[in-house]
């Protein structure tokens, strides 16, 4: 009875895994969600300055590399900007400051994990223009789909070539396999160059079209070129014709696996989380175990086509628990490092992709346990029914492998949710003869700050004013007052989402309280760090 139930479950796993693979494609966002986040700017968005700005400061949540930046006035005239970098702060300098009207600052930067982000900042000099030039469009969803597909195929190809070579030379050294050096290397090179080209198009903000050699030149300035070079080197190593010397062939296969896993450490989220050394070590171990497991599936499936080859299957059954367990531990450690809060499992795309991938891995664990403890021994004993079920089960594992790699490739568009704990909060106590107020600015994940004002009378009693508004200004930086009307908060007090400030230096606040129709009070002060 148990055998029939397991056989029935196995027959359903393959179509179910296929549906899960399709669902992973459906998780792909219509537009790429970048990993670096603009925290604040000076001038701030939609601010009006009294004098022209010679420079614009952009504060991101992590260090970035500037790909391009330009300033455009209301007439459409544009000028390229020079950039000075200081960690996560980018200062863009205008050679010819725009004297009057609306200014659009367009930028394209790349974060440390290799993912580009584009955006525009609009501010005004003197007064807003009656019309503004069109803002540039971001990368299309078609480009995002192309990047996801090429990345998924590249990882699978690397696993089949490098992981398959390690399986053959370690667990099945007696089997003679044909050497296709040129075809293997050329195919890998085409995939890797295509991935770099798409990366360059994404960095430039274009669509999936041919744009000459500029996309490759742009991508070559980042870590993507290093990762592609290491991946290609690993493919070349596995293609070397040294099969006659088994020990040398195995050593080269191990070296190729180390090289391929090192490629993962030069791109992705391991470059933007701390401790960085632990994240990079985990992604290398996770990638190596994943490639060996995936690379072993096709040889095992071929070996079980007619009858089970006992020695490779027995060796694989004994060896796989160690790398498989290592893959799970390294992956869990990465998730713990990259997901600062459990609430982000639902609120962020990164968390939703993680949940989906964990579901696929859980299905894989069930299937792997079924193979090892229920099918391997009878298949080795020559049971034809077990052999057929084992072959089907391996096919299910192949489909699950494709789905897992496809789901993991979605992280190209979903960076780890930034932790607001790393951004400063500000608080100031304000008072006058009529009103006292406690103002708090708390950073929010969306890059804004929540302003909350609690009011009291001079005797510390409650106060119910008609309206409350907040003004933020930085006279030293030429920033005119930015006024925000505050609304009553369900938790008490008055609140609104305002500009997120990373540095309180020079910033002044003014809380205007309309006590009644004839009486108002202004509470002024400077921001203080909590």
Image (cartoon, rainbow, N blue to C red):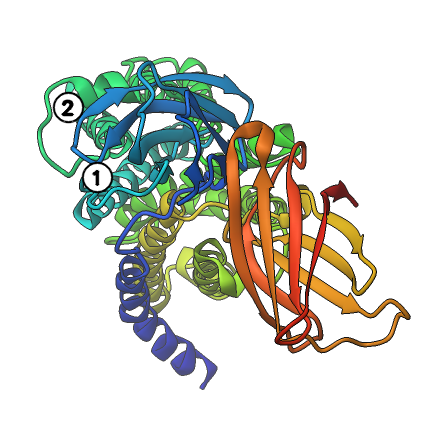
Question: Where residue 304 sits: x, y (%)?
Answer: 30, 52
Q: Is residue 167 left or right of residue 523?
A: left
Question: Where residue 355 sits: x, y (%)?
Answer: 49, 62
Q: Residue furthest bottom?
A: 1
Tell me the tag on residue 136. 1
Q: Is residue 3 above or below residue 469?
A: below
Q: Which residue is mark 2?
A: 183
Judged by depth in the image, the label closer to the viewer, 1 or 2, is 1
Q: CA distance from mark 1 to mark 2?
A: 41 Å
Rendering quarter of residue 456? bottom right
Question: Where residue 328 sits: x, y (%)?
Answer: 56, 49
All told, the count of numbered labels is: 2
Measuring 19% from the left and 45% from the top, which residue is drawn there?
Answer: 131
Element type where label 1 sits in the image = loop
Q: Is residue 53 left or right of residue 103?
A: right
Rendering quarter of residue 296? top left
Pointer 1 local density, CA inside 10 Å: few below 14, some 14–19, many at least 20: few
Question: Where residue 261 sits: x, y (%)?
Answer: 46, 29
Measuring 38% from the left and 18% from the top, which residue is drawn there?
Answer: 226
Rendering quarter of residue 198? top left
Element type where label 2 sits in the image = helix
């Amino acid at each position: 009875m148990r055998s029939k139930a397991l056989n029935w479950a196995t027959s359903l796993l393959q179509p179910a895994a296929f549906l899960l693979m399709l669902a992973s494609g459906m998780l792909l966002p219509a537009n790429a969600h970048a990993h670096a986040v603009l925290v604040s700017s000076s001038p701030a968005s939609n601010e009006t300055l009294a004098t022209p700005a010679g420079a614009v400061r952009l504060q991101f949540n992590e260090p970035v590399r500037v790909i391009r930046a330009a300033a455009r006035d209301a007439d459409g005239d544009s000028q390229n900007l020079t950039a000075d970098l200081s960690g996560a702060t980018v200062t863009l300098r205008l050679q010819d400051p725009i004297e009057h009207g609306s200014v659009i600052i367009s930028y394209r930067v790349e974060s440390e994990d290799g993912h580009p982000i584009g955006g525009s900042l609009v501010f005004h000099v003197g007064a807003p223009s009656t019309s503004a030039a069109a803002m540039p469009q971001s990368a299309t969803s078609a480009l995002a789909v192309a990047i996801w597909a090429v990345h998924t195929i590249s990882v699978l190809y690397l696993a089949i070539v490098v992981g398959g070579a390690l399986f053959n030379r370690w667990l099945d050294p007696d089997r003679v396999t044909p050497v296709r050096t040129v075809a293997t290397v050329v195919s890998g090179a085409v995939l890797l160059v295509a991935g770099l080209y798409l990366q360059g198009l994404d960095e430039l903000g274009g669509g999936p079209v041919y744009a000459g050699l500029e996309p490759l030149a742009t991508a070559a300035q980042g870590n993507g070129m290093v990762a592609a070079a290491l991946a290609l080197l690993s493919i070349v190593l596995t293609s070397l014709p040294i099969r006659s010397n088994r020990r040398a062939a195995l050593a080269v296969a191990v070296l190729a696996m180390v090289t391929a896993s090192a490629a993962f450490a030069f791109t992705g989220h391991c470059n933007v989380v701390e401790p960085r050394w632990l994240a990079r070590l985990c992604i290398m171990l996770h990638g190596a175990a994943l490639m060996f497991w995936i690379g072993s599936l096709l040889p095992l499936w071929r070996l079980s086509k007619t009858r089970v080859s006992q020695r490779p299957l027995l060796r694989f059954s004994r060896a796989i628990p160690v790398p498989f367990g290592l893959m799970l531990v390294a992956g869990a450690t990465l998730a713990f490092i990259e997901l600062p809060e459990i609430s982000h499992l639902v609120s962020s795309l990164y968390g939703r992709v993680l949940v989906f991938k964990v579901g696929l891995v859980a299905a894989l664990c069930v299937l792997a346990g079924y193979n090892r403890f229920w099918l391997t021994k009878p298949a080795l004993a020559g049971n034809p029914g077990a052999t057929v079920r084992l072959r089907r089960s391996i096919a299910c594992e192949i489909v699950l492998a494709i789905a897992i790699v496809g789901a993991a490739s979605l992280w190209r568009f979903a960076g780890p949710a930034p932790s607001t704990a790393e951004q400063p909060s500000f608080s100031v106590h304000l008072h006058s003869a009529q009103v006292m107020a406690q103002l708090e600015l708390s950073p929010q994940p969306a890059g804004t700050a929540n302003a909350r004002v609690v009011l009291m009378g001079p005797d510390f009693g409650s106060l119910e004013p008609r309206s409350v508004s907040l003004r933020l200004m930085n006279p030293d930086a030429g920033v005119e007052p930015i006024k925000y009307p505050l609304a009553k908060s369900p938790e008490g007090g008055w609140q609104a989402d305002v500009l997120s400030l990373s540095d309180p230096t020079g910033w002044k606040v003014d809380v205007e309280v309309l006590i009644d129709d004839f009486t108002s009070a202004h509470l002024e002060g400077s921001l203080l760090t909590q």
